Image: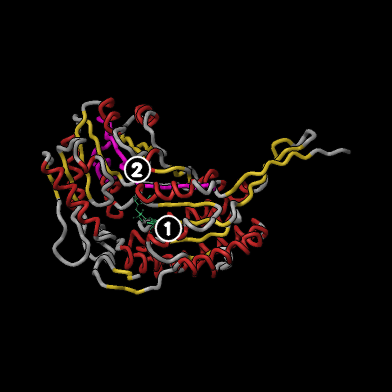
Amino acid sequence: MKIINPATEEMIKDLPEDDASSLGAKFQLLKGAQRAWQEVNLSERVKRIHRFSEILTNDREQLAAILTQEVGKPIRQSRNEINGAVTRIQWLTANAEKYLNEEWMISDKNPEEKIVYEPLGVIANISAWNYPYLVGINVFVPALLAGNAVMYKPSEMATLTGLEIDKRLKEAGIPGTAFQLAIGAGSVGEYLLQIPFDGYFFTGSYRIGKSVYEKAALKMVPCQCELGGKDPLYVADDVVDIRAAAASTADGAFYNNGQSCCAVERIYVHSKIHDQYIDEFVNVVRTWKIGSPEGNDIYIGPLTRREQLVVLENQVNDAVQKGAVVLTGGKRLKHKGYYFEPTVLVNVTHGMRVMQEESFGPIIGIMRVNNDEEALKWMGDTEYGLTAAVYSGSRERAEGILKKLNVGTGYWNCCDRVSAAVPWSGRQHSGIGATLSHIGLRGFTKTKAFQLKSLD
Ligand code: NAD
């Protein structure tokens, strides 16, 4: 498997992929030793995972440089990702004992009754490349804390980071009998679905997630899917500061080059403030520096995958043919690397692909609406359901809209953010199940109810 630097198109490394036989052997190793990991005290497992987060902090510069080289993420955003990962682990370790220890439901009667949260067993974690630390940690950290053994398949586009994660976990005291890597592309993911894991946790596209979910269903084991989105954002006419809203929402659309599952993918603006908002938005976009992601001042680096350039070009062409206007950007850069200019489209309609299909790149369609009802109608016109945001001076107005949308997360005056304290979940084609929060910690367990009658 060739690892390519998306900024230079040069090969960084050539690695051997796993095959059915090596994956089978790794699975047997995990299967044989999972109980031993489960029997390590929860407080000790917490301690080791906490140590892992300290190692990430200590090695941040080195790890950020590898991430940037491999996925093209601007270096400052790579550092941010590692900082975010550490914060996330801190929440999970601080709360693991509260939510994973046994829970007494009736202790003052006979029989006494309690719930015990047992690990699922050996789970497969098939992961994405866009935030390899964050989306990986959503799964393998709570899974390990709960006493599972984990086979972690990093995306083929984030394999070097996967290898670094593996090394740091081992250094922190997670044994190789509790954590193994599966190295390779889609075919390795397919092999994992032929192995009898006790649970499948997938992060990636709807197209692949659906096939993973179908295959896992036949095994009658838990399967969670964190998939894509077409996340809408509405800027209401009572927004407090239009310039600040434009800056915040532009960042929500373009951070990480728009390659975030919860990136803002569609914007609806109240007609009363539409023109001013657009001016401010375009001004912000024009301030960003595009270039080699190693630069500290770079906000837009290359896309991670070459194929996405064509997806973006097709969306722009389709929109322009149907009447959209390109205010800035609209094409790839001519030099080496998978660069695409940050692109703002107005005069868009819902008949355009850019307002329907996940773009997963630096491109946004902005549409004028006349009132909240119209905004709500368009926001809900999607097969996805990850997040939605409303910028407004009124919390009541925003919450009223967010309550009516079929999404896993609603944001008021913020967007494109994930917190470990609340569940991260998608609806419809954005997925099934939840990670993070107490729900995400318990998502890697199966409950056993004890009813204990004393005959004294
Ligand atoms: P992808 O679906 O192409 O790949 C995801 C993983 O599946 C990779 O590890 C890949 O090797 C593996 N895979 C590919 N074919 C497979 C098969 N046939 N069987 C089993 N596994 C297979 O997605 P991606 O390009 O890595 O990630 C981008 C997508 O992920 C976007 O749609 C994005 O929105 C989504 N995403 C969602 C979240 C979330 O939390 N909801 C987070 C990050 C990314």
Given contact means CB atoms under 8 Å apart, are the residues at marks 1 and 2 in contact?
Answer: no
SS for tag 2? loop
Q: Nearer the viewer, residue 316 or 23?
A: 23
Residue 231 position by quadrant = top left
229 magenta-colored? yes
Amino acid type, residue under disc 1 in the picture: Glu
Q: Is residue 219 above or below residue 163?
A: above
Foreground disc of the pair 1, 2: 1
How was the colour assigned to the protein in this rendering? secondary structure
Any atom of ligand 1 within 8 Å of the CB at mark 1? Answer: yes
Image point 17% across, 52% down: which residue? 313
Image position of 430 (left or right of 454): left
Q: Which residue is mark 2?
A: 415
Name the mark on residue 190: 1
Residue 105 horizontal/vertical position (percent)? 69, 37
Ligand 1: quadrant of the figure: bottom left
Q: Residues within 10 Å of mark 1 (few under 14, many from 20)?
A: some
SS for tag 1? helix
Residue 420 horizontal/vertical position (percent)? 48, 48
Image position of 107 (left or right of 314): right
Image point 65% across, 59% down: which residue? 35
51 magenta-colored? no
Residue 81 horizontal/vertical position (percent)? 39, 58
Q: Nearer the viewer, residue 196 or 336?
A: 196
Q: Which residues are magenta?
A: 221-248
Image point 78% across, 33% down: which residue? 109
Q: Nearer the viewer, residue 434 or 28?
A: 28
